[in-house]
Amino acid sequence: MKKLRIEEVSKCFGKGENKVIVIDNVSFEVEQGAFVTILGPSGSGKTTLLRCICGIEDVDKGKIFIGNTEITTMNEEKRKKYRRENIGIVFQQYSLLPILNVQENILLPLKFNRMKLDAEYYNKIVALLGIDKKLKEKITSLSGGQQQRVAIARALITKPMLICADEPTGNLDQGNSREVIHLFQEIRSQFGTTIVMITHDENIAKQSDYTIRIQDGKIMKE
């Protein structure tokens, strides 16, 4: 079964003379459990494409399937519910709440979704990410690399079938960037999670299973 399928997706912003085609008839498939990078320069449309895959943005044309579920037929409220329960999102800006400690930030999606904690799974995640000794610490006491690990744990806590990561190494130094990519590889290996990651870095892209290249809203090469 294909975990993710994009069929002839297009997305525009603006109208009339101000209309800009950001995603132009894009199609591709991602196998279950694959680690895929979408590579392109600034302004190529890669982040908009990821936001469409997550259901944050509507598409103007085309279909997006996650497993057997087509998210492009859902209204905004249904997409939001589906996204919270099935998709983990990791941002370049960690989007953690400084008033909460590490554990509280990780468990926040379960609270919003009224989902029960799987303690064994939780313990495995925080150990894998190397933050099991930091759970009671405030976010502000952590380094950038540690905060990104917390953000990844938060994205994983609902056992998502898909993780979408938008430039997750963008604010990290080279050493922490390598660690984050290694962690994604471990996550894919241990949990069978499909990972789609945006990057502009060729070296990072080479560490994924394969790369989808995008320029001016079009797929150039896989």
Image (cartoon, rainbow, N blue to C red):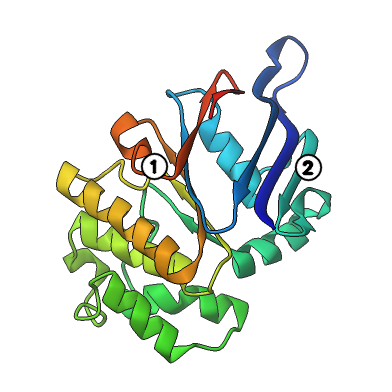
Please state if 95 lies on the left or on the right of 84 as rendered: left
Please state if 134 lies on the left or on the right of 60 as rendered: left
Please tell me which of labels 2 and 1 falls first in the chain: 2
Disc 1 residue type? Glu
On screen, 76 above or below 45?
below
* Spatial CA span between label 2 and label 1: 24 Å
User: Could you tell me which residue is drawn at 53 percent across and 30 percent down?
Assistant: 222
Most foreground residue, 114 or 38? 38
Q: Give the residue number, with chain letter if any, for mark 2.
A: 63
The residue carrying pointer 2 sits among few (fewer than 14), some (14 to 19) or many (20 or more) residues within 10 Å by Cα, namely some
On screen, 206 above or below 41?
below
Please state if 132 lies on the left or on the right of 185 as rendered: left
Measuring from the top left, give residue 196's x and y in whole percent.
50, 48
On screen, 2 above or below 6?
below
Q: Give the residue number, with chain letter if any, for mark 1.
A: 167
Check disc 1 and report its element: helix, strand or loop. Answer: loop
Check disc 2 and report its element: helix, strand or loop. Answer: strand
